[in-house]
C-alpha cells in the first residue's frame, strides 16, 4: 500500500470553532462563535495576548466595546461608534491607520472596495495622530450616506 503524504486528521488536536451557549465545545453547527485570540496593546502600550469575546456577526454601537475588547481589524462598528472611536483613539494611544466601509446585512458584513481610507503609518506623534483621526472621522461621516458599517485598523502610535 502506498502511504499518504502529509498529516492525517488524527495527528492534530481537533480545533473547536464553535461553542454551545453553556460553554461546551462543538465542532459543527451554527452555535455561538468561540473567542478569538489576539495580541493587543495594554495600558503601558506593551503587547499582550488576550481572548477576545467579539461576535463577528454583530454590529457594535458602542465605542467602549472597541477599546475594552480590542476591536481593531475585526469589529464591525456603526457610523456613530466609528466616529466616536476616531475621536477618542488618541487618548488610548492609538492612531487610525485604515477605515474600511461596508453594508450591514443582518447578520453579516459586505465589504465594499469603494469605501477604503488609508491614514498615516505609525510611529507618529500626538499632533499628527489627532489630525489623522479627525480626517478618518470626516471620511466616515462622508461615506455614511451609502455605507453603514465600518471596520477600523488602529495600531499604537508608537508603531505596529
Image (cartoon, grey):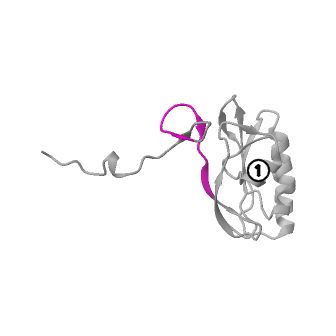
Front position in the image: 37 or 142: 37
Front position in the image: 114 or 80: 80
Front position in the image: 4 or 82: 4
The relative height of residue 55 versus residue 96 in the rendered view (above or below) is above
Give yes or no for residue 133 being in the magenta stretch: no
Front position in the image: 42 or 151: 42
> Where on the picture, by quarter, is residue 51?
bottom right
Q: Is residue 4 left or right of residue 74?
A: left
- Under circle 1, the secondary element is helix
At which x and y percent is residue 29? Answer: 52, 31
> Where on the picture, by quarter, is residue 149?
top right
Q: Is residue 157 left or right of residue 23?
A: right
Q: Is residue 139 visible?
A: no
Range drawn in magenta: 24-38
Residue to which mark 1 is pinned:
66
Quarter of the image where the C terminus is located: bottom right
The relative height of residue 12 versus residue 107 in the rendered view (above or below) is below
Q: Residue at x 71, y 51 (%)?
A: 71
The relative height of residue 127 versus residue 26 in the rendered view (above or below) is below
At which x and y percent is residue 10? Answer: 33, 47
At which x and y percent is residue 157? Answer: 76, 67
Q: Residue at x 80, y 46 (%)?
A: 82
User: Few, some or many C-alpha atoms within 10 Å of disc 1 (few <14, some 14-19, many ≥20)?
Assistant: many
The relative height of residue 67 versus residue 60 in the rendered view (above or below) is below
Q: Residue furthest left?
A: 1
Quarter of the image where the N terminus is located: top left
At which x and y percent is residue 40? Answer: 68, 61
Amino acid at each position: 500500500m502506498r502511504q499518504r503524504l502529509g498529516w492525517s486528521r488524527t495527528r492534530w488536536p481537533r480545533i473547536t470553532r464553535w461553542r454551545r451557549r453553556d460553554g461546551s465545545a462543538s465542532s459543527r453547527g451554527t452555535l455561538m462563535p468561540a473567542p478569538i485570540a489576539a495580541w493587543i496593546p495594554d495600558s503601558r502600550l506593551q503587547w499582550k495576548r488576550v481572548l477576545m469575546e467579539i461576535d463577528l456577526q454583530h454590529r457594535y454601537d458602542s465605542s467602549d466595546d472597541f477599546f475594552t475588547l480590542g476591536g481593531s481589524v475585526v469589529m464591525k462598528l456603526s457610523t456613530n461608534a466609528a466616529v466616536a472611536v476616531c475621536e477618542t483613539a488618541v487618548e488610548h494611544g492609538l492612531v487610525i491607520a485604515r477605515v474600511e466601509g461596508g453594508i450591514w446585512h443582518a447578520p453579516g458584513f459586505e465589504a465594499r472596495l469603494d469605501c477604503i481610507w488609508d491614514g498615516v503609518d505609525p510611529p507618529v506623534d500626538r499632533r499628527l495622530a489627532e489630525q489623522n483621526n479627525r480626517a478618518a472621522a470626516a471620511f466616515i461621516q462622508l461615506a455614511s450616506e451609502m455605507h453603514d458599517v465600518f471596520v477600523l485598523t488602529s495600531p499604537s502610535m508608537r508603531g505596529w
